[in-house]
Amino acid sequence: QVQLVESGGGLVQAGGSLRLSCVASGLTFSSYTMAWFRQAPGKEREFAAAISWNGSSTRYADSAKGRFTISRDNAKNTVYLQMNSLKPEDTAVYYCAASRRGFSVGSASAGFYEYWGQGTQVTVSS
């Protein structure tokens, strides 16, 4: 079965950095569009970043532009989210998602993705 396992979350001070990882198994990783979403307490799950199957195309939420970088290593079945200049409002559970659909404008929508990880908590203190 398909599994997406996130890691790398934790507690960091404002202005700090974290690198999240998501290891996928049970699917042909190099064929999938991958993304990161996040959900803060009491809020809807929101899009953070997405990347095409070969890494040639990326998309970011406005809140992530200039601070977050999504990347992937198909040889390791892993997608990453490098987060810099973190703010308290970045505090959330971060989820990895996978879709068999080709990268498109729809890739910012949660409904675009078939598979989800369990999430990793990121807490940014002020």
Image: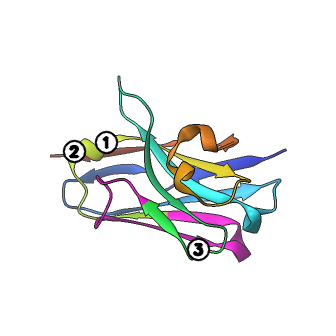
In the visual, does 35 lie left or right of 116?
left
Give the amino acid at mark 3. Answer: Gly
> Taking 112 as reference, is 101 above or below it?
below
The residue segment tinted magenta is: 60-80
Per the model, the C-alpha gap separating discs 1 and 3 is 26 Å
**Residue underneath mark 3:** 55
Write the residue at 68% across / 59% down.
Answer: 102
Q: Mark 1, residues whose alpha carbon is within 10 Å: few (<14), some, or many (≥20)?
A: many
Q: Residues within 10 Å of mark 2 (few under 14, many from 20)?
A: some
Q: Nearer the viewer, mark 2 or mark 3?
A: 3
Q: Name the amino acid type tagged 2.
A: Pro
Give the mark, 2 or 3, whose residue is nearer the N terminus: 3
From the image, state whether disc 1 or disc 3 is nearer to you: 3
Q: Which mark is residue 88?
A: 2
Using residue 68 as the reference point, say whether residue 57 is left or right of it.
right
Q: Residue at x 25, y 62 (%)?
A: 16
Q: Which residue in the protein does label 1 denote? A: 91
Q: Are marks 1 and 3 in contact (CB under 8 Å)?
A: no
Q: Quadrant of residue 84?
A: bottom left
Residue 40 in sight here: yes
Task: Determine the CA span between mark 2 and mark 1.
Answer: 6 Å
In the current view of this chain or complex, which residue is farthest to the left? 126
Work out how far the residue at label 2 is from the one at label 3, CA to CA, in angstroms: 29 Å
Name which residue lies at 74% across and 53% down. Answer: 100
Residue 3 highlighted magenta (yes or no): no
Residue 8 to residue 74: above or below: above
Answer yes or no: do the residues labelled 2 and 1 have beta carbons within 8 Å? yes
Three-letter amino acid code of the residue under disc 1: Thr
